[in-house]
Every structure is written in structure tokens, then in C-alpha cells.
Image (spheres, coloured by chain):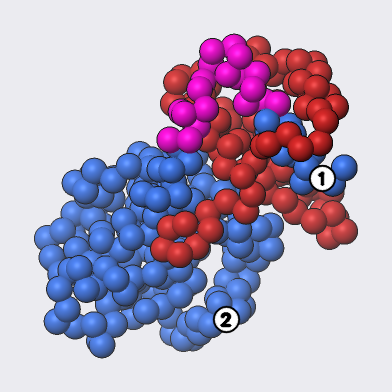
Amino acid sequence: MSKVSEQSIRAEALESLLIEKGLLTPEHVDEVIVRYNERVGPMNGARVVAKAWTDPEYRTRLLADGTAAVAEFEFEGGQVEKLVVVENTDEIHNVVVCTLCSCYPWAMLGLPPAWYKDPEYRSRIVREPREVLKEFDVTVGEDVAVRVWDSSAEVRYLVLPQQPEALCGFDETELAAHVTRESMIGVAVL
Amino acid sequence: MVNGEVVFEAPWQSRIFGMARVLSEQGLFSWDEFRERLIAEIAVWDKANSREIPYHYWDHFLAALTRLVDEKKLVYRDELISQEKVFTDRPHGHDH
């Protein structure tokens, strides 16, 4: 039997036992899946970024206390009990990783992409960030510092990208449509 | 799909994620406890550091979950293995 079928059988066996023991129902599990398949995703983080770009007081609040500032939106998805938002500037480029597993601000960005969880990214972004960023088509100037933020059980990070000139004058909704997941992890600039 | 991209590569991944979240949300274990097991599973792979063995995140997630539910006496390893055998011995054509 292929490995994938083995995992599938194990998952099914586990679920059937948990159901049998009254520890959960399939509907509970379905609900979580639907939540992350349909409702929780980078469009949440994009709204936060767009608001920070258009509202200087919000931006200040967001950088001072990310957790409280994003709570104003009441997003579901979790993993933002302690959220720190780091802003990209002309002098600093920020990028986020979880070196040990896959910690990620779900409520802002949904579930992490495969490359973020991959051992290559997890180790190399800390050791050679500029090289890794180049592979993502991000060239960081010599005079720009690169800061790598390692997520943990305690803290999640979100990058506040710089607002591109081309998007000046747009309203929040329009701006949000241009903010990508990759820019909020720090592996893209807008 | 969210923003046009696939969140899980296979249904079993979504099921184990859902199970882990539900059990945690019900207080049967904390997400931190789950994370510790996940980190430990990943560390075993990292230490072996063998590029011949591909990295499969969800395999580690599943291993962490089965280990944790055993530790918490929710589903024992033996029971799981027995149940797997029941499903494996099923005649073909079973809809899952």
C-alpha cells in the first residue's frame, strides 16, 4: 500500500475511534475545515495592512500592540494571541519564519503554504536571508538591513509592507486587494 | 480554496488538522502541547538530515497527533492499530 493510503487509513481510523468515544463528531471536524478553507485567509491580513496605510493612528496602534489592533476586526482563525507587526521601511526589510515547526498567524494569513514549513526555508532564511529572498525575486539593497523574525509558541509576526507609490490615493478596499500573503511574510515587496 | 489556492493537498490532511483543532478547542490538550509534539517529530527528521527521505509535514503532524492522543489516554496506540487493520481489511469499493 502506498504511504499516502497508509496515512489516509490512519486518519480515518483515528477519527472513527474519536467519534466512537464521543470525543468529537465529524461535523465538528467539517466545521474547522470549512473555516480554514473558506473564511480564514490572507484577505484578513490585507485588510489590516490597508487600514494601516490609510489611517496613521491605526498604524501607530498596530505597531505598538498588534494583538489589540487586529482584535478590532474580530477575525476568526486564532494564533494571534500575541501578534507583533513589524514595518518595512527604506532602511529595514523584515521576513518571518518558524524555524522549529510551522507557527504562523492563522487569523491574518490562513494556514501556511508548504514552502514556509519546508526545512529548506526554515533553516536557510536565518542563515542566508538575502540569498533566499533573491530566490523569491526580492533584491534587498546593500544599505537595507534584513531582520528575520522567528515565530514561536509565544509570538507570531506579520510584516507591514511598504505602500507602493503606484497605490497612493486608493481607498482601503482597493488597497487590500493588492496586498499579497507573500508581502506579509516578507518574501515579496509590493 | 482561499484566494484560489489549495489549503490541504489531500483530504486526510484536512481531517487530522480538524481533529487536532477540535480536541484542542475542547480542552483535551493545549495547542502548545500539540506544538511540542510536532516540533519533536520534525526535530527527529531534521537530525537525520537525510535528503533521501523527503520531508512530509503532514506525516509529522499525524505522528504528533497519534502520539499525543495516546499520551492523553484518548486513543491508545493498540486500538488505533487494530482499527487500521479493520479498515485495511475492508473489501474494495468502500467509499471514503
In this picture, residue A73 sits left or right of residue B74: left
Of all chains, the one bearing label 1 is A
Q: Which residue is located at x 53 percent, y 82 percent? A: A137
Q: Tell me residue A77's x, y (percent).
A: 38, 43
Picture coordinates of residue A99 (x, y %)?
60, 52
Determine whether A118 is above or below A28 in the image: below
A32 over A181 or under it: above or below: above
- Left or right relative to A161: residue A16: right
Question: Quick check: can you spot residue A149?
Answer: no
* Mark 1 burial class by Cα count in 10 Å: few <14, some 14-19, many 20+: few
Q: Which is more toward the observer, A105 or A22?
A: A22
Q: Is residue A34 above or below residue B89?
A: below
Q: Which residue is the site of mark 1?
A: A3
Q: Secondary structure at mark 1?
A: helix
| Magenta-colored stretch includes residue B48 | no
Residue positioned most to the front: B93
For chain B, give the colour: red
The percent position of residue A113, horizontal first and vertical second, equals 55, 58
* Residue on which disc 2 sits: A134
Q: Quadrant of residue A45?
A: bottom left
For marks 1 and 2 on the same chain, the one whose residue lies earlier in the sequence: 1
Residue type indicated by callout 1: Lys
Q: Residue at x 15, y 73 (%)?
A: A171
Q: State the CA–CA distance, disc 1 to disc 2.
A: 35 Å
Q: Nearer the viewer, residue A49 or B79?
A: B79
State yes or no: residue A17 in magenta.
Answer: yes
Majority secondary structure in the magenta region: helix
| Residue at image point 25% right, 61% down | A47
Q: Chain A's shade in the image?
A: blue
Query: Which contiguous range is marked in magenta?
Result: A13-31
